[in-house]
Image (cartoon, grey):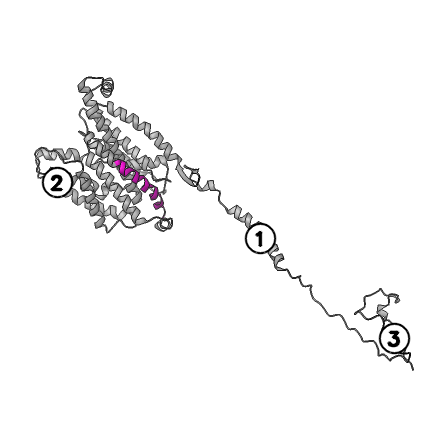
Amino acid sequence: MTPPARGPHPAADPQAPGGEATAPAAPRAESEPTGPAGPARPTGPARPTGPARPTGPARPEAVTAPEAVTARADVTAPEAVTARADATVPAAALVPEDSVVLRGGTFSWLFPRRGALVAALLVPVLVVLVALAVMASSTGMSPRDTLSGLLGTGDPGTVMIVRDFRLPRVCVGVMVGAALGVAGCLTQTLAGNRLATPDLIGVNEGATAAVVATAAGSSTGMVGDWWLGPLGAVAAAVLVVLCAGGAGSAGYRVLVVGIGVSTVIGAVGDLVMSRENDNTAGGVFLWAVGSLNGRDWHVGTPLLIVLLFLLPLALAAGHRLQLLRFDDDTAACLGVDLRRLRAAALALAVALAGVAVGVGGPIAFVALAAPIVAGRLSGPTRVPVTGSALTGAALITAADALGRVVAPVELPVGVVTSVLGGPFLLWVLFRTDSTTGKA
């Protein structure tokens, strides 16, 4: 029996009844070469094609390196830029409210706008106070006579009183007040305490001890030269620092030791003065309460030279001292040599206070009040060195003028400042510090 001839599979026939055309399972040749005519080869039954293998979910196409980079850039770059733009603080927000940035080429300066405005207002106030102090008289000289003496058109006696005595005294008072104000500003910034003054580190007592030592045994009651005061102040400050074991990481240790050393030095000075005669004790006492009486250009000229040298250094130190309002670690990270900065600021404060005390005596209240008033006016973001100098000069000038007109006899400037300093000290103790929020 001859098997039927092989033909196309029904599943591959597009005309197969009852079904749709389906693709063949595998491509096959259209025809096979045949030999000479002969019997057809027997073929077995068609192999069953079993069920199709499950292929699972389609795999994602592989992303080449450039496509991956492009995809990541497309996804993350705009979001990152947006996030960074949102997180970036505007440059104007980093500038303090009381300052303005001045730029010129590659240089920029954070100009203290509020501090400059305060200084510009204090200068005319000081000029008015100087004019009033020159006219103030304990002898009843009229303002007209004072003006004529100042201009040199009055009688010789009036010209001598105004030009040779009163005007030099007022100018010396301005310089003494400026020196005390800057010294108090540096001391308070170092200690971080509004009640810290140079006299707490032995400046006043050291200068007084030097003057007492030169006046001891004198029958005239005349105090020594003005430069003895700074020498005694520096010696007392060095003794305080040595007893404190250095300036330390904070100024309170020097202040506490200074109180003890000042008490001892003051007691020794009082013991020496108790053994002197009335003339010597009276002369030293008048200087010890703080007085500008008899100060002329012979004292004012060297004082001016010293201040021209020390005040620029104090301004530079005050600029660096602003960083001490942070903690020591932060200030050190900002490039501040803490030990050197504290030593330099302390030396400047002692030198300025010593010069002022040597010329005008230990005038109270000015070194305490001037920095506080200047800081209140200038704001908490700056160390008010310039404002403290102007405020101290104004306080001394006003106190000296009041001492010549409020009483039948002239009062020393130190007495007036002490009377004014009591209520001011109570005000400082009971008010809240705007920089720290503490009482």
Q: Are marks 3 and 1 in contact (CB under 8 Å)?
A: no
State which tag comes first along the sequence, 2 or 3: 3
Name the amino acid type tagged 1. Answer: Thr
Question: What's the magenta region?
Answer: 307-326
The residue beneath circle 3 is 6
For disc 2, the marked residue is: 213
Residue at 20 percent across and 29 percent down: it is 297
- In three-dimensional space, the C-alpha distance between marks 1 and 2, rounded to whole angstroms, equals 80 Å
| Residue carrying label 1 | 76
| Quadrant of the frame with the C terminus | top left
Mark 3: give few (<14), some (14-19) or many (20+) Cα within 10 Å: few
Residue, x 15% and y 43% (percent of image)? Answer: 267
User: Residue 432, position in %: x, y?
Assistant: 34, 40
Quarter occupied by residue 148: top left
Q: Is residue 251 left or right of residue 8?
A: left
Disc 2 residue type?
Ala
- Secondary structure of the residue carrying numbered label 2: helix
- Inspect this view and state whether residue 371 appears: yes
- Element type at mark 3: loop
Whether residue 425 appears in this view of the structure is no
Quote the CA–CA distance across marks 2 and 3.
142 Å
